[in-house]
């Protein structure tokens, strides 16, 4: 049911774990629905210098969180804000249709982290 | 790669003896049992013999066994059949809140057709309250439909006591025994069961064959004919289920029943041993895990465990990568994305429902399979808990406005 890429990210999640000294955290989802994602970022010169995640959820939820950390690392904050759900699904060679919305929350989580960072900077 | 099948409640592999039997009948017994000639009558004889074998397993009379295409069809025939035939008598149906969708959705459909349905709550183990059942019966009640044993948590309901109450109030009693037939002894006389659904593929028989036991072959004292057929046509199965009989499949069902009858005691002892071993080893070695369902009033082959802070689909996916087939009540693995109504009904918090894992064993399960599973599971739980932000004692918050309805 899942692509090889999804399975790869599920098996070996990249950048997984809590970041104690993160500059900002984005929290998205809801354990009642079955998904909860934390995206941690560290920012340097307006770029995403480091990023990590923690996820409670299904295989797709874990793989999409892992994938966004790879897509966002090194990007400017403005570019990182532009990453969409479709970008993540595409990079994973697609997701089952039923999972496109329920488990594909990582881009929203990242945007929330960046917004929180920007609010703190003001 | 290992192949350890621990999802016998979903379906079972066919017993080789059943396959042999079916194959034989596909080759030889090709006649239509309704035909006058010898070839047809041979098929009719096989059908009759199969009916006898199946009837003997539940202490029914041969003419009280009606073959259908599935457990779902049997549930539909029982519930809609009684409802539509007895509109003049009453419009109230009593069922439980943990029924299989084949019963639950049928009852919900009947609510749109003018029937009133009471969904009895269950306690933390999934057991209905007999006193409450009796108090719910009115002079409009025509049917009680309570499952024999639950497909998710394995809890066995007090069927004999329910049967007594139904008999006392002259209400028809249907039970969905899809998970039970062949696993624990069933006696429709002793238990006062009027209608009983079962399915061949749950007991090492073929898919596409089910049965409905119908007390008095559809005639009841004071009621007359009490079932309306779903299918109209050539009048097969005494007019209650028109459609040329699936003779090879039915013969396979009968063979499967014969094997269950022969092996039930020994098999159930083996499976209880496995069941209790899994529960013991896991609850002793993994933290924040609990058993769903009852400890003893439980199917011999069912284990259902809840693992806090992680989600079930990721557990079954990880087990699948090790060659172990299991199942979960998590929303994320279901087609509807709805969490298990059974686990919600026994009072679990939605976030805990997602972490459920169902392990169901069967005829071909070995001690080595159980040990392999018990070896592979703990590191999977540990890894997923590392990935999860939910932790023991940690309070989590979430934005309740964010897509809380994205599952619908």
Image (cartoon, rainbow, N blue to C red):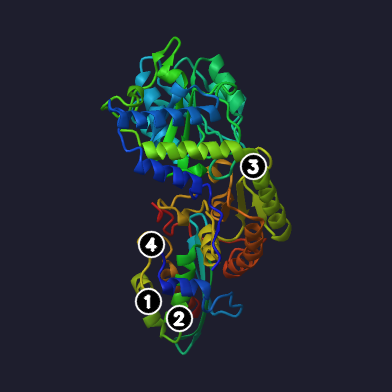
> Between tags 3 and 4, which lies in front?
3
Lower sequence index among marks 2 and 1: 2
Q: Which residue is mark 4?
A: A101
Distance from Cα at disc 3 to Cα at disc 2: 51 Å
Residue drawn at x 36%, y 32% as measured from the top left? B43
Q: Which residue is mark 1?
A: A91
- In the displayed structure, B227 sits above or below B77; it is above
Tell which subunit mark 3 falls on: B
Q: Please determine if labels 1 and 4 lie on a single subunit.
A: yes
Q: Please determine if labels 3 and 4 lie on a single subunit.
A: no
Q: Which residue is mark 2?
A: A70
Q: Dot 1, crowdedness within 10 Å: few (<14), some or many (≥20)?
A: some
Distance from Cα at disc 1 to Cα at disc 4: 16 Å
Kindly state the secondary structure of the residue where label 2 is placed: helix
- In the displayed structure, B13 sits above or below B211; it is below
Distance from Cα at disc 3 to Cα at disc 1: 49 Å
> Between tags 1 and 4, which lies in front?
1
């Amino acid at each position: 049911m899942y692509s090889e890429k999804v399975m790869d990210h599920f098996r070996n999640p990249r950048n997984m774990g809590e970041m104690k000294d993160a500059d900002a955290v984005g929290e998205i989802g809801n354990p009642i629905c079955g998904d909860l994602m934390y995206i941690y970022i560290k920012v340097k010169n307006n770029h995403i210098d480091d990023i990590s995640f923690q996820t409670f959820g299904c295989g797709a939820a874990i793989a999409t969180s892992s994938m966004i950390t790879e897509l966002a690392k090194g990007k400017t904050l403005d570019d990182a804000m532009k990453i969409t759900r479709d970008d993540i699904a595409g990079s994973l060679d697609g997701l089952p249709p039923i999972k496109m919305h329920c488990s594909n929350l990582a881009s929203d989580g990242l945007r929330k982290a960046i917004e929180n960072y920007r609010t703190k900077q003001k | 790669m290992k192949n350890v099948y621990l999802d016998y409640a979903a379906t079972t592999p066919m017993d080789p003896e059943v396959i042999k039997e079916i194959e034989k009948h596909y080759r030889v017994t090709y006649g239509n049992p309704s035909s006058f000639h010898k070839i047809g009558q041979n098929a009719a004889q096989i059908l009759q013999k199969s009916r006898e074998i199946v009837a003997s397993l539940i202490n029914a009379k041969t003419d009280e066994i009606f073959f259908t295409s599935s457990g779902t069809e049997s549930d539909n025939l029982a519930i809609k059949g009684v409802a539509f035939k007895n509109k003049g008598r009453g419009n109230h149906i009593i069922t439980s809140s943990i029924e299989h969708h084949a019963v639950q959705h049928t009852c919900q459909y009947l609510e749109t057709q003018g029937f009133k349905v009471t969904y009895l709550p269950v306690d933390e183990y999934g057991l209905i309250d007999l006193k409450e059942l009796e108090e719910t019966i009115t002079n409009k009640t025509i049917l009680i439909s309570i499952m024999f044993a639950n497909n998710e948590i394995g809890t066995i309901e007090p069927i004999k006591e329910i049967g007594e109450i139904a008999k006392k109030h002259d209400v028809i009693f249907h039970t969905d025994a899809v998970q039970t037939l062949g696993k624990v002894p069933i006696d429709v006389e002793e238990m006062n069961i009027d209608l009983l659904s079962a399915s061949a593929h749950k007991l090492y028989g073929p898919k596409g064959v089910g049965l409905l036991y119908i007390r008095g072959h559809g005639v009841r004292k004071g009621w007359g004919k009490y079932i309306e057929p779903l299918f109209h046509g050539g009048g097969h199965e005494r007019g209650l289920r028109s459609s040329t009989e699936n003779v090879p499949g039915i013969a396979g069902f009968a063979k499967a029943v014969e094997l269950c009858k022969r092996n039930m005691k020994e098999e159930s002892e083996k499976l209880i041993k496995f069941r209790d071993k899994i529960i013991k080893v896991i609850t002793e070695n993994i933290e924040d895990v609990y058993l769903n369902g009852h400890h003893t009033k439980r199917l011999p082959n069912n284990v259902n465990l809840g693992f806090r802070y992680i989600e079930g689909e990721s557990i079954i996916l990880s087990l699948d990568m090790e060659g172990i087939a299991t199942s979960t009540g998590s929303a994320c693995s279901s087609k509807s994305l709805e969490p298990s109504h059974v686990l919600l009904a026994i009072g679990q918090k939605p976030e805990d429902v997602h972490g459920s894992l169902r392990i169901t064993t069967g005829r071909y399960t070995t001690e080595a399979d159980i040990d392999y599973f018990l070896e592979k599971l703990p590191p999977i739980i540990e890894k997923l808990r590392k990935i999860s932000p939910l932790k023991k004692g940690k309070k989590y918050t979430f934005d309740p406005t964010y897509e809380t309805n994205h599952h619908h």
